[in-house]
Amino acid sequence: MNIDELSQLSLSGLQSALAMKQLSPVEVLKTTFEQIEKVNGSINALYDLRKQAAFAEAEAAERRYASGAPLSAFDGIPVSIKDSVNAVGMRWHHGTAIHREGIVASTDSPPAARLKRSGAIIIGKGAMPDFGLSGSGVSGSHGIVRNPWGLSWNTGGSSAGAGASLASGIGMMSVGSDIAGSVRLPAAHCGLAALKPTQGAIPHAPASTVRSAGPITRRAADLRAWTALLGGIDTADRYSVPLTDVVGGDAPRIGASADFGFGPMVEPAVLTCFDRVRRVLGQICGTVEDVTTKADFDAYLPIDDSLKLKGWLEYQSADPDLRDRTPEPLLAWFREVQDWTPNKIAEINQGIERGVAFTVALLAEVDILLTPVMPVVNFPAEDRGPDPKMPLRHTTFTSLFNQSGNPAVTICGGFDDRGLPIGMQLVGRRFDDYRLLDLATRLEAALDIFGAGKQRWPTVPIA
């Protein structure tokens, strides 16, 4: 087993190989850590690696397989979790140096607890940007995470380390979290698949009405199984809801839009990819309707203000002697919050509700909506976003659905002429996560980008 072979395996393929003893958990983990040692110095994706503990867990899983009693179908499978996902004994930095050397977790977040119960092996944590408040891999605590499809290009964020590590073949899944696109953006930048679920369908802590935990994988076909493992009610998340699986019923009505009426102009390469994916989607579903609904206001701006407030509160809660470790561009972005009045906060909330009403209008006539993930393909690794004054401005197509709670899945739609991945997004009605994932899997198979003899994962990062 080498990393090229392992990276081409689907989750079901690896599970079958482990169950039939064609591969062993120790062998898989050895290949995984060999790849970490080869590439993590250049992509800077993972930290807090658990090598000794992980091998002990792999050896225990191997014994269970030998006796015919694995803990689950995920026993012995290597995964990673985001910096902001707590796991006992691992360090939480939230991407920023204002938290010193990090805070060692004393409890497991719901995703970490469910992974551990299944026997999946958490190999380490994925780096993220400061406060989780840029769509990039630029981090005060971790440095710059780099994209293995091109080390000078951005990974997206905030689940940056997840994107870079998975694209280079490390692990079978990473748990990220998404507040404006933070699993979907790195998936798009790195050629991966990711789910931002219906709000609450995958429990997380602390509980949130807009931030969702979600799985990131190399292929959409793997997302359903990980979603089933991670999803469902958990007492640690008071907003958690049951995962439902719609069986039968009418075929979903499919729509498409690459223009919500606001936000940065969509780049030609993204539009070309969108048109191609739409044609393939039409071949699968028969009809893809034009969704021409557009906002007559900029629905992103109140979301941006809410993110400024989030950053300011974390900044203010830090030790005053450490606040100067906050990157000046981020501080310049959210410093204005100190002068806001209650009326300003009320205006932000009203604007967000207006945006939610717009998402309802977008899905009024269709069940599933195809959009780009971003209006841009990529931007330099050192940048926090395409717009230096507004680090998440390019989340036109993603951030609205955090506020509305709709599920959204990202897949790789193709590549531009520089060889950089372009992500496409499918958005569904609330609680339609499984139907959305099934369509994403069919669409990915029809696009056949990573099929036999086609695109290979950059297990040797591209300079």
Image: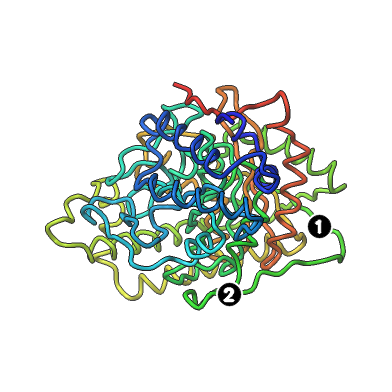
Residue at x 70% of width, y 61% of height: 363
Q: Are marks 1 and 2 in contact (CB under 8 Å)?
A: no
Kind of residue indicated by mark 2:
Ile
Give the residue at mark 1.
253
Q: Which residue is mark 2?
A: 233
- The image's mark for residue 421 is none
* Residue furthest out toward the left: 321
Q: Amino acid at mark 1?
A: Arg
> Is residue 127 positioned above or below 381 on the image?
below
Give the vertical position of 425 relative to 240 (above or below).
above
> How far from the left and from the top, in percent, is residue 70?
62, 57
Q: Secondary structure at mark 1?
A: loop
Position of the C terminus, as image quadrant, is top left
Q: Classify mark 2: helix, strand or loop.
A: loop
Q: Quadrant of residue 413?
A: top right
Q: Position of residue 156 (x, y in %)?
A: 46, 42
- Residue 175: x and y, percent? 51, 54
The reply, left or right, for residue 350 in relation to residue 382 is right
